[in-house]
Image (cartoon, grey):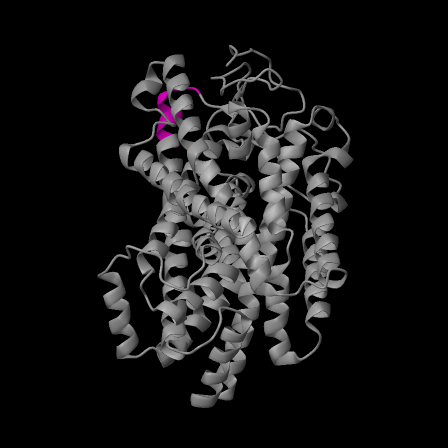
Amino acid sequence: MNGPRQEEVRKEAPQTPASEPQEAGVGVPLLSRGRLPSCRVGSLPRPPRFWRLVGPGIIMVATSLGSGEIYFWPGITMQHGFTLLWPALIALSLQYVLNTEFARYTIATGETIITGFARLWAPLAWVFLACSTLPWLWPGWSTGGATALSWVLGGQVDVIAAASLVLIGIALTGTRVVYKTVERIEMILTVFVIVSVALVAVLVVKAPTLGAFAEGLGTFPTAIPEGLDIATLLAALAFCGAGGSVNLATSHWIRDKGFGMAKLVPKVTSPLTGEKVAVASEGYFFKADEENLSRWKSWWKLARREQLLSFWLTGAFGLILLMLISHALLYGQDLEIGMGMLQAEGAILGQNLAAGLQTLFYLMVAAIFFTSEIGVLDHVARVSADIIKTNSPIIRNSSSRYLSESALYFFVLWLMIFFAIGVIFVADMTDTPTLLRIAGSLSGIVMFLYSALAILLMRRLASQVAASDERFRSDNPFQLPLWRLLGLMVATLFYGGFSFLLIANIARTLTG
């Protein structure tokens, strides 16, 4: 690494609120690389009450519900019972560790974690651009939601899927601060889903299912169940929580929520509102004085609590209930993991309980897929816009509002929408299982990559920050406790191992 460069605060930097005056000068450089400025100094903002910070974890859970929780894990439970319950809970817990580590970086710097990875090696930004777009180009969530909605309202799946994509694009384009709209929609839909799932579970889960669940809790699998292909398992593990670049988007969502130093960074806003900020969102840190260190501890505690309650607990609650419902209704039946499985669950509810419950279940399934569709479109546009604005020299230095991060967000958003519609109509790809397996398998490989990079980034930053000021040696914002370091190492081995099995399986298939 080259030595840090000292530069003055750039003129286009956003103004800090009057209650938190920004200091002139340069703070602790963050793994400075030649073409990026050293970070600027700013006082760490005062943390608000906890409930004002709730939201990013809910968006992540909402995004994940439409694949792992509603689709893969209930399907695995239908076929194999609760034999893989512990791997599911481990995957969810590993994602909690990853999410909070990405949040740690953004709270301390105002930057996204991908900018941090690019400080290790600049080309990594473009690697993550590919990793954040390619797995999500396939509109499995929109076709899944459209299929479930057609069970209730009738109509053509491809038309409903395309209409949902356009409506989401209009909703996000017509709002001022995009994050607030995404958060509100996802919270409303998530509450509806959780209440519906809980109601169905209370009505259908009986003692035999609870006994099987308890047995699953008491045993740990030593082998992959016979008949379960690696691609499906890797997709299930990747989507058990958030998955792939959705975890990376933790940085972007807490940035726009205003966590820590991210409060000093511009938010993604609609170009229709006249937004003019074109600065790349990077480069703040705080001095190691008593007040800043105290605020850092408070922010870090709040971020962990937000992810624990709104991501881990909510995700585990929804995951377990959907597995219980699947076991109670379908265990032992000869069905494939697919939309037919979900349709069969609803049909059994209608036959054995009430027609209204069948309708509720189908609407819940549609809502789950559509929450994921919103999260997928939003996070891909966020991550892509951030990478392009921060790492492309021409676009980075442009002051044009049409090349701002916000403008790039909407360009990518509508590009994704039009591509997805093309896949649905031109390529005639509406097979939800295939589309979700593609996304899930690629996402698992991405998770292996950033789990390993997170270890390297945090350890290097902890060393550099400690060397810059002796007060950071005892209160180092980047210092990993032993259990967190072990968690990241397990995540690397966990996703890396399954990714290796997937690649080896594909290679065997291709070579005959």
| Residue at position x 52%, y 11% in the image | 2
Which image quadrant is residue 408 in?
top right
Most foreground residue, 382 or 16: 382
Residue 381 falls within the magenta-colored stretch: no
Q: Looking at the picture, does residue 152 appear above or below residue 272?
A: below
- In this picture, is 510 found above or below 372? above
- In the rendered image, residue 291 lying in the magenta stretch gets the answer yes
Q: Give x and y (percent) for residue 437.
A: 54, 57
Q: Is residue 149 visible?
A: yes
Report the span colored magenta: 287-295
Give the main secondary structure, helix, strand or loop, of the magenta stretch: helix
Name the residue located 41 percent from the left edge and 17 percent from the top edge.
Answer: 464
Image quadrant assignment for residue 315: bottom left
Which residue shows up at 64% across the image and 28% down it? 391
Q: Outermost residue toward the left?
A: 218
Residue 6, x across and y down, in percent = 56, 11
Between 80 and 508, the residue placed more toward the observer is 508
Q: Position of residue 310 (x, y in %)?
A: 42, 53
Q: Is residue 314 above or below residue 462?
A: below
Q: Quick check: can you spot residue 19?
A: no
